[in-house]
Structures are given as C-alpha cells and as structure tokens.
Amino acid sequence: MRILTGIQPSGILHIGNYFGAIKPVLDLQGQGEVFVFLADLHALTSSSNGAAMRENIRTASIDLLACGLDPEQTVYWRQSQVPAHVQLMWTLTSVTPMGLMERMVAYKDKVANGLSANVGLFTYPILQAADILAYDADLVPVGKDQKQHLEVTRDIAIKVNEAYGEGTLKLPDAKISEDVAVVPGLDARKMSKSYGNTIDIFTEEKALRKKVMSIVTDSTPLEASKDPDSSTIVDLYRLFASPEQVQQMKDEFRAGGVGYGHFKQRLFEAIWEYYAPMRTRREEILAKPGYVDEVLEEGARRARAVAEPTLERVWQAVGMR
Ligand code: ADP
Ligand code: TRP
C-alpha cells in the first residue's frame, strides 16, 4: 500500500492544516509506504515574492518534521527537486481535455477571491495528478477541498490508459478525513490563511492565547445558557480534548454562569499542551544546522528512484522512447 500526499509550503502551519492534512498522514506512518512532499511548485502559482517563498519552504520543511514526520519511515522531499513531476505533468497536459480543467472549483474560487489568473493556477490540477501518478500511489489522504483534484487525477489516468493501454498509470483513491473535514477558524468560516482566521501551531504562548481569545462569539450574557452545538470554541476543543472533557464543556455551556472567556482559556490550555512535544522537537531540529537539507536531499533521492521508472514507462507508452 503506497500512501502519498503533498503539502503546500504556503505559510505558517495552522490547526486546519494539521488536522486536515498532516495528522491523517502522520497517523498512517508505518502502515504502508508513506510518501510526503512539499508542493513548492504548486505554491509558486500563488506567489510573487522570492524571499517569502524561500522562507515558507524552510519553515514548512522544519514544521512537518517537528509535527512528527519521521524521515526513517517516510519518504520526504521537495517537489522541485524531482524533475519527473513536471516532466510527467507535461505528458498529461496532452491528454487532458480543456473542459475538465474549466470545471475546477478551486481555480474558479481563487479567481473569484481576487487572485490573478495565471496559467499555472489553471493547470495546477494536472501537476497534482502528475505528483500522484508518478508514484503509483494507492491512497491519497487530503482535506475535503481536494476531492475534485483527486477525481480529476483519476479521470486523467483513465484517459491515458484508454489512449495508451491499460496499466500505463495506476488509479489512486482519495482518503478524505471526514471527521475533521473542515476545521473552523476564528470567525467560524473554514480556517484558512487566505481568510486570515488561523490559529498557528508554532506561535509564542502569549500570541497563541491572544488568538484563541479572539474567537468570535455571540453576545449571550455570562449567566445565560449557551448553545454548544453552534460554538467554534467547542468545535475546536473537540480536536484537543477527550470526549469526557468535551461533554463537560458542553454541559457547562448549557448550564450558564460561565463566560466565553473562560471556555477560551480552557481551549487555549488544551492547544498549548497538545503541541508541547512538537515545540520541543522543533527546537531540537533548529539546533542541528544542515539537518533538514540532508533529510530532503535523501528523500529526493528515494523519490526519484520511484518516479523516474514511472516516467520511463509512460514515455515508452506515448512514444517518447
Ligand atoms: P489554506 O486554506 O490555509 O491556504 P492550504 O490550502 O495550504 O491551506 O491547505 C493545505 C492542506 O490543509 C490541504 O490538504 C487542506 O485540505 C488542508 N486544510 C487547510 N485548511 C483546512 C481546514 N480548515 N480544515 C481542514 N483541512 C484544512
Ligand atoms: N493541492 C494540494 C493542497 O492544496 C497540495 C498537493 C499538491 C497535493 N500535490 C498533491 C496533495 C498531491 C495530494 C497529492 O492541499
């Protein structure tokens, strides 16, 4: 069983990324061959600042290791260090119908949100398909928002197989983590860097508390009963606390007499404690200069050993060899 996913190094990791993308993958470590890469070429489609990009890649590469990515168990590399991704992508562009790309919701959303429509953004799903297909991945754990990209990946693989022979590419399955499908942000919308409503994992204690305290709540008075089922505080607390602790908080919500500030403080403590071991590991990694680059270099070597033979197989099928 080969499990593969890509994480965009598009900024500082937040709780949504962690529960939506990182944790589900880390939980699979040891259950198969796990492949995780930093999708730096994808991030490039929404960037115009080289220094910021370099810094984002550095931060993300460290943070994933700090979160528990084990380079002994998992192949971990940077997309741009394995040329086969782009080489396979170009091959796939030649079988991908325009209509398929024009239906992509993520692209339409980004344009609607004011991102300029560059061609990279448009062809983004084809690069993603190449990322997956180059490794003959069986399973791709992703957030709900990536469902369509996975469907397109299968569609493209089917097209290739129809044109050039069954078995040219392997059809992957998506693994959508339904229970934590969408982590809400400070304003109850989906937590996202682009909404500026994130709670970041590796922040200072004071800054983290301030963030949690800024969760938007309604104006129910302190003494009144509150609805736990429509509360961002409870929804987030669920991710960090035991079922008993969550039940306790819900009961206190309903009972009244406790203000939102108190619940936020409890949520803050749970988050701070949860990430304590990861903060420690992060410090350890930062104390070893060159370590992260070595890990990624070795990962790229192992990734190339898998992706290059796939590319050869496809090039053989399409007549480039
Ligand atoms: P952002 O929306 O902050 O820009 P990305 O688009 O870089 O985040 O997402 C990186 C990964 O994290 C994706 O797999 C995505 O599905 C997941 N993810 C991001 N935000 C959330 C969220 N609020 N809930 C669940 N998963 C999320
Ligand atoms: N598009 C994905 C995201 O924004 C990142 C990604 C790129 C990816 N290539 C991938 C995820 C391949 C899974 C498999 O989250």
Image (tube, helix red, strand yellow):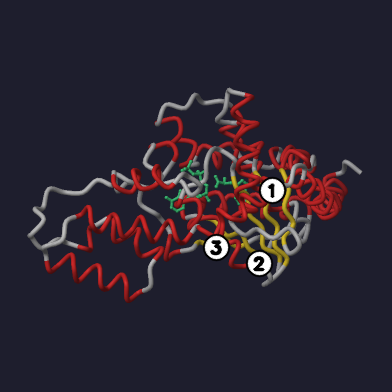
Q: Residue at x 92, y 44 (%)?
A: 321
First in residue order: circle 3 vs circle 2: 3
Disc 2 and disc 1: Cα gap in Å? 19 Å
Write down the residue under mark 2. 29
- Front residue of 107/258: it is 258
Q: Position of residue 64 (x, y in %)?
A: 62, 51
Instruction: Identify the amino acid type marked 3.
Output: Pro
Write down the residue under mark 3. 24
Write down the residue under mark 1. 131
Labels 1, 3: front one: 3
Instruction: Identify the amino acid type marked 1.
Output: Asp
Q: Position of residue 7 (x, y in %)?
A: 60, 47
Disc 1 and disc 3: Cα gap in Å? 19 Å
Instruction: Identify the amino acid type marked 2.
Output: Gln
Identify the secondary structure beneath mark 3.
helix
Q: Position of residue 50 (x, y in %)?
A: 64, 24
Q: Give left or right: position of 218 versus 161.
A: left
Q: Residue at x 22, y 58 (%)?
A: 230
